[in-house]
Amino acid sequence: MPDTELEEADVVTVSVDEGPSKKRAKKSADQTFLTKYSETYPTLIASRKGPHHAHCTLCKSDFSVRSSGMFDCKRHCESRSHKQFAEAPNARAKQSTLSLSGFFPASQKQTSGIERATTKAEAMICQLKEKVLEFRLTRTFVSATPAVD
């Protein structure tokens, strides 16, 4: 009779060592903006809001990178609003020009020509005062220092 049945001695136990378990490294809860984000997404720079934010120079918006870091940057660059700015024909002009009115809340934006002219004149006077002060300080410093032969 052919020996088709396995006996206890014929059973071999093989253990496979899978090595150390491969667990994903858990990301820190507080991601910060890294310069490599700018290399991958050139329109992104560090934000003035703090280390946990990025600033998009194309959209002129700040967003948090605290939760996912690079993925937050990717999500922003793939968003509808970012793509609209990127596809606009004058996107480069928007990127290179800064408007002074962008620094004021909508409630404080001036609407009349007289108010704009007044603000412009006030800014010019402030610049003039700085130049006069700089000139006075330079003149005082020069007259206070002895002549070197």
Image (cartoon, rainbow, N blue to C red):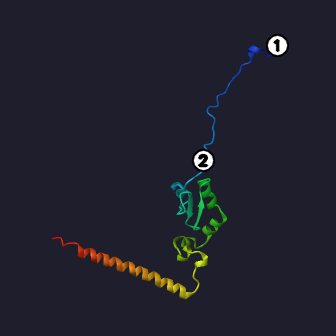
- Nearest to viewer (mark 1 / mark 2): 2
| Residue 127 vs residue 37, the one in the foreground | 127
Residue 84 lies, in percent from the top left, at 64, 68
Kind of residue at disc 2: Lys
Q: Distance between the Cα atoms at labels 1 and 2?
A: 61 Å
Q: Which residue is drawn at 18% across and 70% down?
A: 148
Q: Dot 2 corresponds to which residue?
A: 27
Look at the picture and state if 141 lies above or below 12. Answer: below
Q: Residue 2 — which label?
A: 1
Residue at position x 60%, y 47% from top?
Answer: 27
From the viewer's perspective, tell me whether residue 147 is left or right of residue 87.
left
User: Which residue type carries mark 1?
Assistant: Pro
Assess whether mark 2 and mark 1 are in contact (beta carbons under 8 angstroms).
no
The local secondary structure at tag 1 comes to: loop
- Quadrant of the image containing the N terminus: top right
Q: Earlier in the sequence, mark 1 or mark 2?
A: 1
